[in-house]
Amino acid sequence: MQRLPGPTEKVPGALLLEFRRDPLVTLMRISGQCGGMARFRLGFQRVYLLSKPEYIADALVRHNNDMVKSRGLRMAKNVLGEGLLTSEGDLHDRQRRLVQPAFRHERIASYAAMMPGRARSMTERWRDGEVVDIHKEMMGLTMGIVAKALFGAEVESEAEEVAESLEAFLKNFNRVTNPLASLLERLPLPSNRRFRRGKERLDALIYRVIREGEGKPEGSLLSALVAARGDGTTDLQIRDEMVTLFLAGHETTANALTWGWYLLSQNPRAEARLHEELDSVLDGRLPEPDDVPRLGYTAKVLTESMRLYPPAWVVGRQTLRETEIGGHRIPAKSLLLMSQYVMHHDPKHFPDPERFDPDRWTPEMKASLPRFAYFPFGGGPRACIGESFAWSEGILLMATIARDWRMSLLPGHRVALLPRLTLRPRYGMKMVLGRRPPGPQS
Ligand code: HEM
């Protein structure tokens, strides 16, 4: 058992401040200096940063039962309640079984069938040369899709309201590394009022969707949840599950697409390759779910976008008991951090890591990549339940939109990262829309 390296701190508390200011740079620095496992403190919390694929597999797969979600996600219970993302143990197992059928292959194909049409309705509002915040557009689009797919509801008119509520949640969530968070939560601050108002509005929306969904055809996720009511599932539980799926199911995919559009705008050769693929596979028609396996380059663009800008940039776990990882004894109540952002920028696995290169994703490279060197969807029993949904959605939306449109970054627009619960563009993403010449059949 060797001593673990850790970053040095000149002044007590300096590391916590640095982490709160810029967690991505801080984690990259620590991993660069300390290698596969680093030990340090953030305030009173003992932290281990795992940056070796085997260690991450140990934590997320082998020792899943020795851990719970980190404080960050436990704080998110304020909004998400005891839904799939935040619940633990038997409650989690039961809910995962209940929700799983909604994510079976055939159901995803049926949701996927409506995705291109919804993207098309959005772009019908667009005008050549217009400037839009593409992040806002993607959030509205993916939000409408997840609500329609899983709950059979239309929520488009509430998009603005949901975005505001989310903003209020995320601001409060930022307190996660603040040792005084629980005290702050109880003070009559404007941010707490905004948070409560946001929660009320979101709840009102979700309860409306539940009411609307009660008469919905069998087979929808909502009808399965409603049917489980007598089985120990309460209205509150249904609400928690729906809020979770609604929030987890749109912001991540919207970010993946937003960063994808940005990267394409900066890489004309990749953009031209994407257009070539779309022109040849689609031949002017809208994509369909069956096209997904044929849109290989589109998938590579998304894979590479999520490598450089992983929408979930870190996962955290707290150890319940002493646990051994990579030959090191980790005490109970330690926080384990595993950062997709750090792993995906590791030159050992991704040579020239800052370069956007969709072509690096050859079958040979994928076969030789260690599991958890690339893990945008997490892994183990708590892996993303929506992964296949997200792949179909990302590919079909990118294909539908890029078939007709290209986007260039508005000159002077600042692009910076905002690592909150997901990795957002700090100032949004203002882009100029350009209509592509009509394809062969349209
Ligand atoms: C690009 C898109 C997405 C990314 C990058 C992503 C990423 C992730 C990650 C990393 C986790 C694991 C978190 C942890 O281990 O603590 C997760 C969990 C989860 N995701 Fe996703 N996700 C995406 C899309 C979706 C979609 C479309 C849905 C639903 C429609 C969804 C629903 C969930 C749920 C419910 C969980 C909790 C699963 C459990 O604990 O059993 N996600 N996601």
Image (cartoon, rainbow, N blue to C red):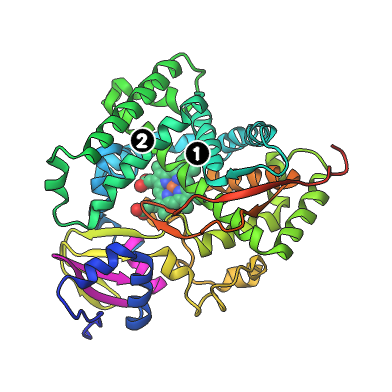
Q: Quadrant of residue 34?
A: bottom left
Q: Is residue 47 magenta?
A: yes
Identified by mark 1, the residue type is: Phe
Q: Is residue 79 left or right of residue 418?
A: left
* Picture coordinates of residue 288, whole percent (x, y): 71, 39
Give the secondary structure at mark 1. helix
As measured in the structure, the alpha-carbon distance from the residue carrying label 1 to the one carrying label 2 is 27 Å
**Label 2 sits on what residue type?**
Ser
Q: Earlier in the sequence, mark 1 or mark 2?
A: 1
Part of the protein shown in magenta: 37-60
- Asked which quadrant contains residue 206, the reply is top left
Q: Dot 2: few (<14), some (14–19), or many (≥20) neighbours within 10 Å?
A: many
The correct choice, above or below, for 269 with respect to 352 in the image is above
Please name whichever residue, 63 or 234, is drawn nearer the observer in this view of the structure: 234
Is residue 32 visible in the rendered image? The answer is yes
Q: Residue at (83%, 51%) from the top-left corner?
A: 280
Q: Residue 384: tell me if it is visible.
A: no
Considering every residue shown, the one lying at the far right of the view is 440
Near-viewer residue (108 or 350): 350
Asked if the residue under mark 2 is in contact with the one under mark 1, i.e. CB atoms within 8 Å, the reply is: no
Q: Residues within 10 Å of mark 1 (few under 14, many from 20)?
A: some
Instruction: Please give the name of the residue rendered at 52% of the width and 64% of the height, measured from the top-left corner.
Output: 308
Asked if residue 375 lies left or right of residue 11, the reply is right
| Mark number displayed over residue 165 | 2
The image's mark for residue 103 is 1
168 relative to 420, above or below: above
Which quadrant, please, contains the N terminus?
A: bottom left
- Is the CB–ligand 1 distance for label 1 below 8 Å? yes
Q: Nearer the viewer, residue 330 or 273?
A: 273
* Image: 298 above or below 162: below
